[in-house]
Image (cartoon, helix red, strand yellow):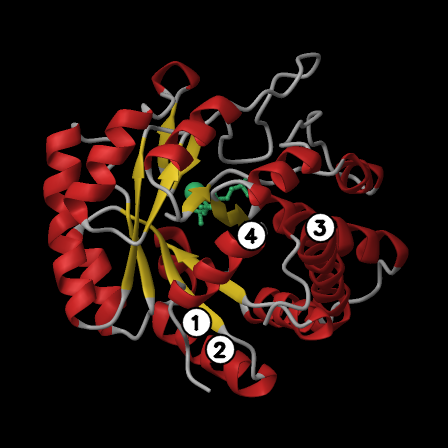
Amino acid sequence: MALVTTKEMFKKAYEGGYAIGAFNVNNMETIQGIVEAAKQVNAPLILQVSAGARKYANPRYLKKLVDAAVEDSGLPICLHLDHGDSFELCKDSIDGGFTSVMIDASHESLEKNIEITKKVVAYAHDRGVVVEAEIGRLAGVEDDVNVADSDAMYTHPEEAYEFATKTGIDSLAIAIGTSHGAYKFKPGTKPKLRFDILEKVGNLLPGFPIVLHGASSVPQDKVALVNKYGGAMPDAIGVPEEMLRKAATMAVCKINIDSDLRVAFTAAVRQHFAENPSHFDPRQYLGPARTAITEMVKHKLIDVLGCAGKA
Ligand code: G3H
Ligand code: 13P
Ligand code: ZN
């Protein structure tokens, strides 16, 4: 089995009313933790690498780790570039063996976004690689670009239709109120997503896979664990899981999760050191972190995304 694209996964997910988990990876323990969860519940997977992850780990190392995951698990796994901000970055990822890329020119005008995205689509499709793009802007940190709340914009459904049809992309990320990072909604406020926008986009583009970024739920018990063992995370509010479940039954076929993995990993490391202050072998604290990733991802695959058993 080789790496796959998202074509088949998204088709089945759309028809089945569930979503595929797209998890950000930066190191071996996270990859192994995620893949172990998918193996246990027989789920398809998207492993995604951001520009920051490329800088941190070198995409060549991550590609080999993901190849090993495919070989070890036999699962359908797609290796995806998350938030590629230029044609060159997408090209480099395609040339390096990624099976899916995101070109994120959402900060540009609609015309410019279409122009850059079309160029990536042409290069990718010639090589059997699929393309995700974005329209509208999420608040929060996107690959070193900090989008202020005031600059965030909901997606206009008509623009989404124009963008998808003119560019020939394979999936589209839209902005309906989620945002990147652990602090998505102000404490004391009620999380709200614009399901009306999602519904309109779904009606205009029937059968077309929609992507939800910024979809971590930031579980309070994990934040509490981080803080119990010496952390100082402010109260965080993520996207309620029932909203993600609803989105998965609609046109959303890919749900991006990074922050939840970070919090689970960090909570496990902090707890380990608090309970074992004399330990200094990295395997002693990275092992529990890897297990915490597995538990978190299993919960997402079974209870939130609905893709357990769909590999
Ligand atoms: O969308 C952002 C992802 O969480 C990746 O974050 O740029 O810090 O690797 P990063
Ligand atoms: P979170 O920060 O909510 O995990 O979002 C991750 C993401 O959208 C990666 O592209
Ligand atoms: Zn994102």
Kind of residue indicated by mark 3? Ala
Location of residue 192 with respect to 282 vertically, above or below: above
Residue on which the image places disc 3: 264
Nearer-N-terminus badge (2/3)? 2
Residue on which the image places disc 4: 19
Whole-Å distance between the Cαs marked 2 and 4? 24 Å
Whole-Å distance between the Cαs marked 2 and 1? 5 Å
Q: Is residue 266 visible?
A: yes
Residue on which the image places disc 2: 65
Location of residue 257 with respect to 105 vertically, above or below: below
In this image, 267 relative to 129: left or right?
A: right
In this image, 146 relative to 306: left or right?
A: left
Whole-Å distance between the Cαs marked 1 and 4? 24 Å
Residue at x 37% of width, y 43% of height:
206
Whole-Å distance between the Cαs marked 1 and 3? 21 Å
In this image, 302 relative to 87: left or right?
A: right
